[in-house]
Amino acid sequence: MSLEGKVALVTGSGRGIGREIALLLAGRGVDLVITDIDEASAVKAAEEVKEKGRKAIAVKSDVSNAADVEALFKKAVDEFGRLDILVNNAGITRDTLLVRMKEEDWDAVLAVNLKGAFLCTRAAAKIMMRQRSGRIINISSVIGLMGNVGQANYSASKAGLLGLTKSAARELAPRGVTVNAVTPGFIQTDMTANLPEEVKTSLMNAVPMKKLGEPRDVAELIAFLAGNGADYITGQVIGVDGGMVMS
Ligand code: NAP
């Protein structure tokens, strides 16, 4: 299941789960395009990849901006000449109850979490179809499967990602490109650290394993889906959630 010499682009990889995915892939021999809306964190994460002996470039990019995404994929190909793995990880929350939700809260979350993944998937697909190989992995969420109070925008964006995953998987399968989604549960990052205590308690009560997941738990699944062991897996939605959702 060697990933040695492959090239991956992970969106939102300056910190959190994205950074962990990038570092784990680097440890398995992958060169990285680190991209984040926050340039300083992208540069720092790229340095950490280089410390692991792999090549890395840091690119500041807003995934919801079509011009940024076009420039991002051009830089990736100019630097590495190919792209084997895309992880659509960048995501944001703007939580509030539905009746209080402003149009801007809806638009901002859908723009980053769903349109961002569409723009990056479209750009990567053009490169990967030419190569006749590639792996696209979308980071959805258990909230896209279950819904959640105060997260109508986030839940809709993460459910939308599942439709994008399945349609892209069907279109790209004949060209050797697989597209899968993972649905993390309650993972310990800045995104969950900022949740109100009562929300954290109710989420924890819904986890049969009674513990938070670590970014590493998600990264291990991504590395599996990126490797040869997942050659015959496409269009799937795979949970990493301590048993929160069982289908
Ligand atoms: P995080 O710690 O908030 O990290 C998200 C990263 O995305 C940050 O580096 C952020 O940059 C970057 N980002 C935000 N908007 C962007 C944009 N427009 N363009 C490019 N990059 C952007 O979040 P996380 O917990 O690691 O979550 C990563 C992914 O996993 C998200 O898609 C999230 O929805 C999903 N997820 C997380 C959990 C969880 O429990 N943590 C559970 C299920 C799914 P800044 O540093 O500038 O904000």
Image: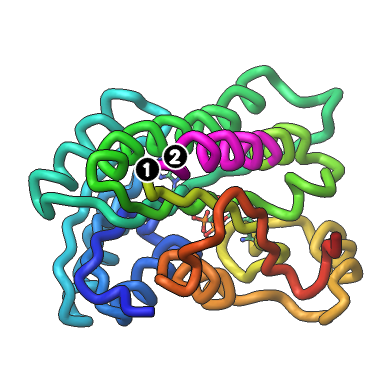
Direction front: furthest residue: 174
Distance between the Cα atoms at labels 1 and 2? 5 Å
Q: Of helix, strand and loop, which mostly describes the magenta segment? A: helix
* Residue located at (38% from left, 49% from top): 176
On screen, residue 47 above or below 158 = below
Which residues are drawn in magenta?
Answer: 159-174
What colouring does the structure picture have?
rainbow
On screen, residue 162 above or below 185 = above
Residue of label 1: 175
Q: Secondary structure at mark 1?
A: helix
Q: Position of residue 106 (x, y in %)?
A: 66, 25
On screen, residue 145 above or below 232 = above
User: For the residue marked with disc 1, what is the amino acid?
Assistant: Arg
Q: Position of residue 146 (x, y in %)?
A: 84, 48
Query: Is label 1 in contact with label 2 (beta carbons under 8 Å)?
Result: yes
Considering depth in this image, is 201 or 67 the residue closer to the camera? 67
Q: Which quadrant is home to the C terminus?
A: bottom right
Considering depth in this image, is 18 or 101 the residue closer to the camera? 18
Check disc 2: other Cα within 10 Å, few if <14, some if 14-19, many if 20+. Answer: many
Residue of label 2: 172
Q: Position of residue 182 (x, y in %)?
A: 61, 58
Q: Position of residue 41 (x, y in %)?
A: 31, 58
* Residue located at (70% from left, 64% from top): 239
Check disc 1: other Cα within 10 Å, few if <14, some if 14-19, many if 20+. Answer: some
Considering depth in this image, is 128 or 192 the residue closer to the camera? 128
Q: Secondary structure at mark 2?
A: helix
